[in-house]
Image (tube, rainbow, N blue to C red):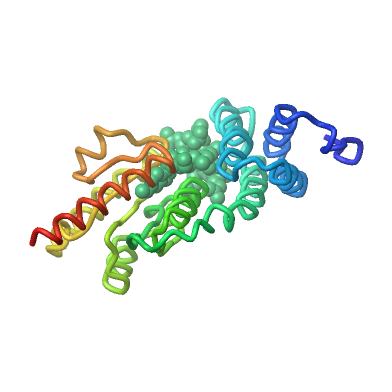
Amino acid sequence: MEEDEINLKEMLDDELYELMQEDLYDGYAQEVSEEVEEMLSRDHQPYTILTEGLVAGMDVVGADFRDGILFVPEVLMAAKAMKAGMGILRPLLAETGAEKIGTMVIGTVKGDIHDIGKNLVAMMLEGAGFEIIDLGVNNSVDDFMGAIEKHNPDIIGMSALLTTTMPYMRVVIDALKEAGIRQNLVVLVGGAPLNEAFAEDIEADAYCRDAAVAVETAKKYMAIRRQKAKAD
Ligand code: B1M
């Protein structure tokens, strides 16, 4: 897509979202950034831009990656473009001025380096008033345990995008049980291959389908914790 020939200002909203999705697919970080800025200048909500432009574009990348149309280098370029767009939206999603409602340690589990969804969840929770300790990717039980000891969080969030890495969530939960601290923490899990049945099976507190559900669920559990603390 020759951006020089395109005047973003003249495009309709729908056309611009379509272009953003195409440019994300093609890995054009600079162009995606400009389109995000243009949408912001039109007073679109950061969350709308995120879902209608960036996440929608990444959905197409995911489908074509699955179908063997795209390969790892192209997906990495798309991920870079996604991150460029998210970088602009991050402070806006976080600047709600909400008072701190809880602390969460979040990370992608061992063997897994996917972090776009996890970053999105972290960003949205931060915006909702949570203090976030983001452990990044490829986290072992020891990484989670170390962070729990250091930060004393209310919630542990784990992300996995591979069917081969999702079982590691059970390993972390079992370690929490063995250490006798499972009941002190809320454990939320998410990632494309998971579902509610899996979360129940590994004895997580809840499965979060997407970032918005993660925020809702985290808030709900904080309310329950506060009520419980009052009653004790
Ligand atoms: Co990978 N990859 N990848 N990949 N990749 C998938 C996951 C895959 C489904 C693609 C496919 O085949 N269609 C497939 C997994 C298949 C399977 O396990 N059954 C796959 C594969 C196979 C691989 C490799 C093995 C490929 C290879 O090397 N041959 C390899 C593995 C590397 C490793 O981790 N060890 C690999 C590598 C990569 C890249 C590095 C190229 C890149 C990652 C870049 C990065 O993250 N920095 C990548 C990408 C980008 C994808 C796809 C295309 C997109 C993932 C994404 O970012 N989605 C993905 C296809 C897909 O998912 N459709 C794919 C957008 C994001 C916003 O959504 O992550 O689902 P998502 O997050 C959502 C929810 O799931 C939820 O909220 C988020 C926001 O709404 N959520 C949580 C996520 N985590 C949460 C945590 C919570 C709560 C909610 O905690 C409370």
Looking at the image, which residue is at 30% across and 40% down?
A: 207
Q: Is residue 160 visible?
A: no
Q: Relative to 180, is 118 on the left or the right?
A: right
Q: Nearer the viewer, residue 111 or 91?
A: 91
> For residue 162, what is the image quadrant?
top left
In this view, the residue farthest toward the left is 232
Q: Which quarter shows the N terminus? A: top right
Q: Relative to 190, is 204 on the left or the right?
A: left
Looking at the image, which residue is at 63% across and 36% down?
A: 53
Image location of residue 49, percent across then percent down: 62, 40
> For residue 141, what is the image quadrant?
bottom left
Q: Nearer the viewer, residue 93 or 19?
A: 93
Image location of residue 226, percent across then percent down: 21, 58
Image location of residue 71, percent across then percent down: 62, 36
Q: Nearer the viewer, residue 195 or 221?
A: 221
Q: Is residue 107 visible?
A: yes
Q: Nearer the viewer, residue 103 or 68?
A: 103
In this view, the residue farthest toward the right is 5
In the picture shown, does residue 207 fall above or below 136? above
Q: Which quarter shows the C terminus? A: bottom left
Image location of residue 154, percent across then percent down: 27, 61
Looking at the image, which residue is at 21% across and 38% down?
A: 200
In the picture shown, does residue 130 fall above or below 124? below
In the picture shown, does residue 145 fall above or below 74? below
Looking at the image, which residue is at 26% across and 54% down?
A: 222
Q: Could you tell me how many numbered marks the image carries?
A: 0
